[in-house]
C-alpha cells in the first residue's frame, strides 16, 4: 500500500538520517531492503528491534561485504533496484566496489543517494561529525537559545532529520521524476550541512533585510518577543503562546484577563521586558491543564507543551491518528496522508539478518545461489 508501491530500494545500513529516509520510503509503500553487516547478527548488546523505530517496515539481509561474492550479490540486487541509499564517508563505497560508477554500469537508471554530514567534497568531507557540528556551521545553531546564554542543540531534528533525511528524500524523488524523461539515473549528494542551511532560508532573508539580528533570543521567533514564548505554569508545566497577529494577541489578552490592564504596546521593544514579566507572573497562577481548558480551541495561538509520553494522548493527535502501536511500542504514524493511495501500517523493525533468505529470494536470487551464499557465510541468516 502507499503511493510508492513498486519502487525498489536498497539501503546500506547506517545510523540516524539514512535509516529515517529509508523508513519514510518504506512507510509510503516502497519495497526497501536493508543490507546489514554479517557481524551484526546476534552481536553482543544487540538491541530489541521493537524499539528501533527507524528500522521499521523493511527486511534485513546480512552480508559479509569483505567478501567479493557479497559485492557481486549487491550488484546483482542493484540490477533490479530503483534507488540505493548509503551514508558512509566519501570513498567508502568506491573502495568496496559499490560506488556510483560501479552501479551505473549494472543499472544506468539507478538513483544513487549519498548521505553525509559535510558533503562529498570540501575540506571537511573526510572529517567525523554529528548533527550539532553540522548545524553549527549552518548558522542555525547560533540562532537557537536564550538571550545571554549559550546556543541550545535542538535535538537532532534540524540537522540529521530535517537537513539530512528530508533533503535526501526530496533529492531522490526529484531524480526519479527526471528519470521519467531522460531514462537515466544520477547521484544525489545530500549533505546535512547543506540541508540545514537551506532550512534556514527564512532566517538569512530576514537577516539580510535587517529584520533579524545575530543576538540570540532577541528576535521574532527565538523567544525574543513576550508573545511568542513558553511560560511556566503553577504545576511546573509549560505552555506556548504565539499570537503574532494583533487580533490574535488581543484575544489572548482578553481571555487571560489582561484585556483591560494598561500594558506596553505589543510591538514596543521598550516594553517587552515588562510585558514578559507580567505574562510569566500570570501563567504561574494556573496549572497547565487549567490554561488548556481556557485557551485551547481558540484563536489565541496557544498549546500546552507536551512531553513525549503525553503527546500521543492529546485529542488532536488521537483524532488524526498521529501515533500507532507496533509490537507494543507506540510510535509516530506514517505521514503525510493521501486521498487514494493511503499507506498501510508498517511492519516491525527487523533484527540484523532476520530476512536474509526470504528477501533474497523475493528479489529474484535463485534458491541454489542463496543456499551457497549461506553455506559459505557470505550471507548470514539470523536464527528464528
Image: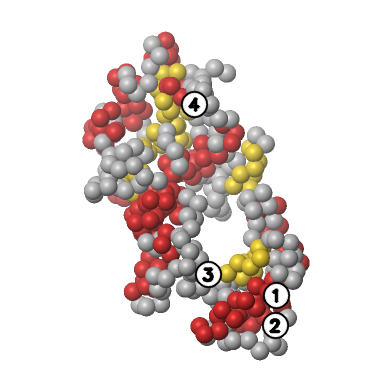
Q: Quadrant of residue 276?
A: bottom right
Callout 4 secondary element: loop
**Where's residue 327, x and y in %?**
65, 34
Name which of mark 4 and mark 2 comes first in the sequence.
2
Point 46% across, 61% down: residue: 150
Foreground pick, 361 / 69? 69
- Residue found at the far front of this picture: 148
Left or right? Give the position of 307 relative to 156: right
Question: In the picture shown, does residue 354 fall above or below 22?
Answer: above
Foreground pick, 62 / 154? 154
The answer to whether one can see residue 313 in this image is: yes
Name which of mark 3 and mark 2 comes first in the sequence.
3
Dot 3 and dot 1 residues touching (CB under 8 Å): no
Query: Quadrant location of the C terminus?
Result: top right
Point 40% across, 73% down: residue: 213
Distance CA(mark 4)–CA(mark 2): 59 Å
Q: How is the image coloured?
A: secondary structure
Dot 1 and dot 2 residues touching (CB under 8 Å): yes
List the residue tagged with mark 3.
223
Distance CA(mark 3)–CA(mark 1): 17 Å
Q: Residues within 10 Å of mark 3 (few under 14, many from 20)?
A: some
**Where's residue 36, x and y in %?**
43, 28
Q: Quadrant of residue 325?
A: top right
Question: In the picture shown, does residue 236 fall above or below 116?
Answer: below
Task: Return the mark for residue 258.
Answer: 2
Name which of mark 3 and mark 1 comes first in the sequence.
3
List the residue tagged with mark 4.
352
Point 43% across, 44% down: residue: 17
Point 45% across, 68% down: residue: 216
Distance CA(mark 3)–CA(mark 2): 21 Å
Amino acid at each position: 500500500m502507499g503511493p510508492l508501491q513498486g519502487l525498489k530500494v536498497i539501503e546500506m545500513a547506517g545510523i540516524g538520517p539514512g535509516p529515517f529516509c529509508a523508513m519514510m520510503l518504506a512507510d509510503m509503500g516502497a519495497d526497501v531492503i536493508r543490507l546489514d553487516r554479517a557481524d551484526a547478527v546476534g552481536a553482543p548488546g544487540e538491541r530489541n528491534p521493537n524499539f528501533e523505530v527507524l528500522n521499521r517496515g523493511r527486511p534485513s539481509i546480512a552480508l559479509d561485504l569483505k567478501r567479493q561474492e557479497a559485492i557481486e550479490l549487491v550488484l546483482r540486487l542493484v540490477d533490479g533496484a530503483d534507488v540505493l541509499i548509503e551514508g558512509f564517508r566519501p570513498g567508502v563505497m568506491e573502495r568496496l566496489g559499490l560506488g556510483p560508477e560501479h552501479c551505473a554500469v549494472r543499472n544506468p537508471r539507478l538513483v544513487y543517494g549519498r548521505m553525509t554530514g559535510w558533503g562529498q567534497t570540501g575540506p571537511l568531507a573526510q572529517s567525523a561529525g554529528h548533527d550539532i557540528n553540522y548545524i553549527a556551521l549552518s548558522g542555525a545553531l547560533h540562532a537557537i537559545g536564550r538571550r545571554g546564554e549559550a546556543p541550545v542543540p535542538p535535538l537532532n531534528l534540524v540537522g540529521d532529520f530535517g537537513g539530512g533525511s528530508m533533503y535526501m528524500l526530496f533529492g531522490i524523488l526529484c531524480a526519479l521524476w527526471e528519470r521519467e524523461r531522460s531514462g537515466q539515473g544520477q547521484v544525489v549528494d545530500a549533505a546535512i550541512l547543506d540541508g540545514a542551511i537551506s532550512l534556514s532560508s527564512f532566517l538569512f532573508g530576514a537577516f539580510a533585510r535587517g529584520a533579524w539580528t545575530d543576538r540570540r533570543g532577541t528576535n521574532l521567533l527565538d523567544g525574543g518577543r513576550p508573545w511568542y514564548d513558553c511560560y511556566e505554569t503553577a504545576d511546573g508545566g509549560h505552555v506556548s503562546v504565539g499570537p503574532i497577529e494583533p487580533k490574535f494577541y488581543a484575544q489572548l489578552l482578553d481571555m487571560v484577563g489582561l484585556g483591560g490592564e494598561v500594558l506596553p504596546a505589543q510591538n514596543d521593544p521598550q516594553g517587552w521586558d515588562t510585558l514578559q514579566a507580567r505574562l510569566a507572573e500570570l501563567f504561574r497562577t494556573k496549572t497547565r491543564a487549567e490554561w488548556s481548558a481556557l485557551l485551547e480551541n481558540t484563536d489565541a495561538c496557544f498549546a500546552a507543551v507536551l512531553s513525549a509520553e503525553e503527546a500521543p494522548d492529546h485529542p488532536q493527535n488521537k483524532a488524526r491518528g498521529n501515533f500507532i502501536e507496533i509490537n507494543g511500542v507506540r510510535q509516530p504514524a506514517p505521514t503525510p496522508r493521501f486521498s487514494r493511495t493511503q499507506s498501510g501500517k508498517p511492519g516491525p523493525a527487523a533484527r540484523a539478518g532476520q530476512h536474509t533468505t526470504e528477501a533474497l529470494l523475493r528479489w529474484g536470487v535463485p534458491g541454489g545461489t542463496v543456499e551457497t551464499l549461506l553455506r559459505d557465510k557470505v550471507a548470514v541468516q539470523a536464527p528464528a
